[in-house]
Image: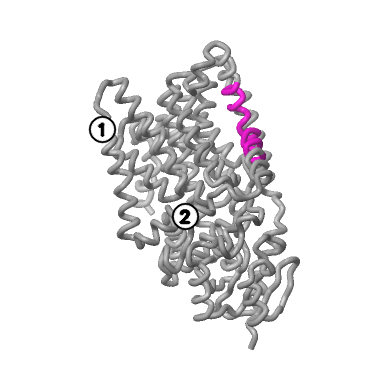
Amino acid sequence: MPTSIPLLRRVVALPSRLPASVRTGYWTRVVPVLALLAALTHIPSFLRPVWSPDEGFLATQARMLADGGVLYDTVVDRKPPLLPWLYEACFAVFGSASLWPLRTLAIVAHLVTAILLASLARGRWGDRAGEAAGALYLLVSIGLSPEDTQAATFEVFMLPAMVAAFRYAERRRWLAAGIAVALCSLTKQTGGAVMLPVLWMLFQDARQRGVRWLPALGKIGFGFALPIALVAVILTKPKGFLFWVVTGSGDYASLGGSLLQMTGRALGNSAILLGAGLGFLLPLGRRLWFAFRHRPLAVAAGAEHGATSDLWIWLLSSVIAVSTGFHFFGHYYLQLIPPLVLLGVGAVSTSAISWRPVAVYSTVAATVFWALALFWPGQRLTHTTEVATTVAEQTTPKDTVLVWGMHPELYWLADRRPASRYLTAGFLTNYSGGKDGQQVGEQYSVSNAWQTFDQELAKNPPEIVVDDSGRAPYQPELIPKIENLLATRYEVVGVNADTVIYRLKR
């Protein structure tokens, strides 16, 4: 006991021995507050086993990789590999029964993004602007549908590298900026759009300082190419990586769906995000209006203020990224938030507008979205869980299952192996959100997908087939190969709402 008392005293006195810059420094005060805010705003993410089909796809994909699957060969997706590998690593450490480790890492990703935004704003407009940028980002990061903001998906993990790329470019650290753009692109392809503001800052810096831009461009190019080459050539199969990540998504990303539905989704999600960020977007709009009245040509060029031209280029690149593929899903809009927050913070910081109404509105809006996440309807999840339970009861862990639909979380919830590398019907029919059936069918599948699919089912026919298509334009009646498969080899053993469960005939 006597020896433990001095030790306890030394531990208690440890904070007082730290340098004053650490004990009372800016980041020592700001980071804990941002960490608490990041955790509070995303508490609802832990209340559901799965929030979106993307989470279900990644979880199922990670299990397949853990069982010996090969990415872009026997395990396929149109996305880059970093997030599937992260899911696989978390499952290896914590088990694959829950997504709580990924949800925790998603909160960390939001926190890192907030800190980087705070650093950018602080460098431009001062300490208070830095605090506001970090806090406002976290508040508006839940300002969309809860299925888009509370899930641990691609956009969330893309944002830290995206903001880091911009921050490195602002500080003329061109090699690091190129590496950050590569990491962003290896999380989701559209993250590479941040290369546009990086290059803009490079050429602006060269023009203003009168220095050569070619060496810096070489550093950006080398930093960007090295991680991608490492992943494409060494860590995956080059041909598979090139096809699935770069060249194989032309039909999926084409304007081939319902124009009315896509327009409605684009305007709807834009309006929701506008409502969530109105606290700082209103001052931004006010400033733009006054600037337009005095300098319309400058505003039309997106350069209303010299210190924010790079932010406008960043926002433009993000708009292009969100529009790519013409799907306009809500989670795509997360890419718009960082530049919008910085532009809004800059507008408030350089005007006579008080921070109080901005903070109050943003807090109230975030509280509404937080409550919405708590009480978000769960009928679809309940239905999927019931079907997954039935599948688990009808099979053994050695059996394989085929889900003919767009909800791969069924595999993960049932804890059963997929019979095919194609986890959704979209790979075999080109169906995705917004498709109206005009370019959906066997003839629009991924190249050679049906040949591979037939070989997989001939080698190891699934014990259970779940027809989860409902009235979608890829329902079995419209896909002859699936209709024939079910009619000749399977029998109905269960129906749950519009989902039909088939078992292999004996």
Label 2 with label 1: CB-CB less than 8 Å: no
**Residue found 24% across the figure and 27% down from its top:** 212
Compared with residue 286, is residue 19 higher up or lower down, i.e. above or below?
below
Residue at the extreme top of the image, as rendered: 294
Residue 450 image point, x, y percent: 52, 69
In the figure, is residue 321 to the left or right of 283? Answer: left
Residue 438 image point, x, y percent: 64, 55
| Residue density around tag 1, few if under 14, some if 14–19, many if 20 or more, within 10 Å | few
Q: Which residues are magenta?
A: 268-285
First in sequence, mark 2 or 1: give its number.
2
Q: Quadrant of residue 262?
A: top right
Q: Quadrant of residue 176?
A: top left
Color scheme of the displayed model: one colour
Compared with residue 119, is residue 475 higher up or lower down, i.e. above or below?
below
In the figure, is residue 126 to the left or right of 145? Answer: left
**Residue found 72% across the figure and 53% down from its top:** 377
Compared with residue 135, is residue 438 higher up or lower down, i.e. above or below?
below
User: Disc 1 residue type?
Assistant: Leu
Query: How far is disc 2 from disc 1 in space, using C-alphas?
Result: 32 Å
Is residue 485 inside the magenta stretch? no
Tell me the SS state at disc 1: helix
Tell me the SS state at disc 2: loop
On the image, numbered disc 2 is attached to which residue?
A: 79
Magenta highlight: main SS: helix
**Residue found 33% across the figure and 28% down from its top:** 203
On the image, numbered disc 1 is attached to which residue?
A: 214
